Amino acid sequence: MKKDLFTVIIGGKAGQGTNKAGSVAAHLFSDMNRDVFQMNDYPSLIRGGHNFSVVSTSVGPLRSHYLEANLIVALDKKSYETHKNHLVKNGVLVVNSDEVKETEIGVPITTEAKKHQNPMLISGLASIAILAVAVGVSKEGLVEIITKEYKRNLEDNVAFSTTIYEIAEKTIDHKFVLKRGNEKKKSLTGNDAIALGAIAGGLDLYFAYPMTPSTSLLHFYANNGQEFGVTAVQPENEIAVANMAIGATFAGARVMVATSGGGFGLMQEAFSLAGMVEAPVLFYLGQRPGPSTGVPTYTEQGELRYALNPGHGEFPRIVASPGSVEEAFSLTSELLWLVWRFQTPGILLTEKHLAETTMSVTLDPEKTKWAEPLLHSSGEFKRYRDTPDGISPLLFPPSSSIIKWSSYEHDEQGFTTEKPEEIAQMHEKRRRKLYSLIQYLQTIRTVNVFGTGEPFIFTFGSTTMSVLEALEYGGISGTVIQPVYLEPFPVWELEKYRGKRGIVVEMNSTGQLATILHDKVGIEMKALIQKYDGRPFTPTELATKIKEVT
Amino acid sequence: MVDQLATTAENTWCPGCGNFGILNAMKKAISMLEQHGIPRDHVIISSGIGCHGKIFDYVNLSGLYSIHGRSMATVQGIKLANPELKLIDFTGDGDAFGEGISHIIFAAKRNADITVITHDNGTYALTTGQFSPTSSKGFKGPSTPRGNVEEPLNPLTLLMEVGATFVARGYAGKIDHLADLIVKAVEHEGFSFIDVLQPSVVFNDTYKEYNDRVEILEKQPRSYDEAVQLAKRREGKLPIGVFYQVSKPVFHHELYGEWNPVKNRLHRKERLEKIKRFIEGES
């Protein structure tokens, strides 16, 4: 079991602000120097439906939410029905007594909310008031939080939340005592960390068409970009997004584009163009359950093979997937650096579970990389100069030299060619870039290894967080192996596990990582633990599954 | 001057192709632009895929040889990265009005400061003469042996409708006039478009028709409505010249004002300091 763990679930209709309430709850715990992990579960709609935010907190590292809740605030009947079984022993379930009659602790949230303007929106604040009472925050403390977090119609917000506080005080005052932690950490979403990592790496322009789970990146840059000299552009579709980005690199701008599976499909043609013209474009691919529209606001890892093989023709590409919000920050800058160093497209592969999850982090901006290309210095400039490592030094316009990037097979100058020896020469040049890339990757960390001994558990992306938390929760020892780089696949790091029987944990139905480990490294799987219902693993269910196979 | 713009690439256009006229007009326009103070190294070109696209290899200017239909997005990206550059994008009628129609419409809508020159030959020549978005109804090609059943679209009225701020028509057979149009289009601040009537000697030889019908506009139409009416004309004389020009705020300026992303970029140290402050302020 995990010590000092506390979980609150806030459930309601879309429009009641459960996600916002969740993040306010997370801040409340952060202020107690506790680690937080917030996961929002919401359907693809704007009003109604059932949304919930689950916030877990502990003293010390926390890598997953838990669904076993100490406190549940059900703002509507559906939330009560959905979550009543998630309550732990001695837990507290507070319902909106205007909707649910059959429980002990009810607060007339709707009745009270109707006394104010915009009752739907304000009703969500009840969850903060109830949480404050339950964990022993004073009424003044609550007012302080509301004043900071809910500035619009502040007077109403304060009046409503203090009324709810006073009602709840009669039944659940100081119900839980939460220990304070020692270190105050910041909490960020995966997308915030990625956005900041790209800025640290040198980002100038960000192009995107909105698509969950990438959308909050677009909003981040639109709102905060100017401060960092970064411009967000929202073109007409993903095709324009990717092609504009390639054009921008021609002029020397560091760029990133972001999308999800369907949008990435539209970018394939440009991905191949980037391979041919040798454009350093960083693509962000945020996975959600597919195929097709799939389940837009949930999570999956069904696009691993898709991410490894985009674009027609042969050219090197770099694919990596972060296993935590902290890693997302540094890895994004590293990928931006790599695509510039090797002048080829790269993919930051992630999932909704990382992109939209908020967790406590310690970020060190000094540990990021700075994307700097190899520049042409002297002699005649040839855009595709055939060099021993395959990398041709760059020049940007305006320049007295002619700089020609071409989608056609080209000679060293960039002019179209159909000559057999030149076609082969350019294939070999691009191939040598791949070898140079592999050589470089062999000098940096490409695989994370946690723990020691058997079993050997292989996983990738955000599922790494679920696995690590499950092991801690279940008191299970073993080695967790997370390939951060997925293309080129770090066979050199993984070969030592050949002959050992491993367990693979991944969020898809076909075992994509398992087959790659088998095909590329020769690792046989003892067991495959999968989940493909759109919901991330919880530590309790995953610990049970791991115990079943070990 | 003109010779310096030639390249060593072997020209593979069919003898007599209208593309030669556009190439010569382009070279002449570059020299004229230099006289007007726009240095050659600031003029960046792109093209789509088709016979027209080969012009990329035949003009000794920097640029990015893009893919079918996407060059209009490519040049907008270059412009956004460094707004000091002047972008000229050569497209075919298939690029601009088939594969990439969304990009030209949006480039015009947002008044991206680029020049799009469409080599409008009304056929897909490089793939052996299928009908194109601007082929006339009844056009016979290998994919329409009984004649094209679709109506052609009208590049000029379409672009005026979606907000282009400079709309012109040129003719590959009138090189000096076309060179002059290119100069005006490049000097126009905002989205400029020239639809160039371009005979394809093998698949759609319109020389005789155009030589009979083309007529240089003496005066630019006085209003938007007049320009649209003139552009709609199908019978009789085919006017060439500037149909419509208006001054409106340009996209990159609306987006980031006087900023230049590649020239003004913040350096690492400044960024890291700002990131630290940002994270501190977050929670």
Image (spheres, coloured by chain):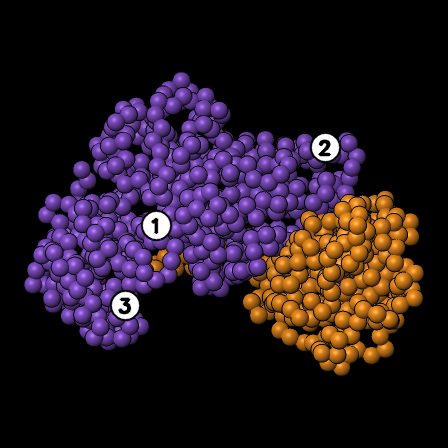
Q: Position of residue B243 (x, y in %)?
A: 77, 73
What chain does badge 3 belong to? A
Question: Disc 2 on helix, strand or loop?
Answer: helix
Task: Answer whether labels 3 and 2 touch (C-beta < 8 Å).
Answer: no
Above or below, comparing residue B86 to residue A414 in the picture: below
| Quarter of the image with the N terminus of chain B in it | bottom right
Question: Disc 3 on helix, strand or loop?
Answer: helix
Residue toward you, B235 or A426? B235
Residue toward you, B249 or A426? B249
Q: Quadrant of residue B166?
A: bottom right
Q: CA distance from mark 3 to mark 1?
A: 25 Å
Pointer 3 residue: A120
Residue under disc 3 on the same chain as residue under disc 2: yes
What amino acid is at disc 2?
A: Gln
Pointer 2 residue: A425
Chain B display color:
orange
Front label number (2 vs 1): 1
What chain does badge 2 belong to? A
Pointer 1 residue: A357
Q: Position of residue A179 (x, y in %)?
A: 15, 50
Query: Which chain's colour is purple?
Result: A
Image point (61%, 61%), residue name:
B80
Label 2 Cα neighbours within 10 Å, binned few <14 / some 14-19 / many ≥20: some
What chain does badge 1 belong to? A
Q: Which of the two labelled residues, at mark 3 and mark 2, occupies the earlier sequence position? A: 3
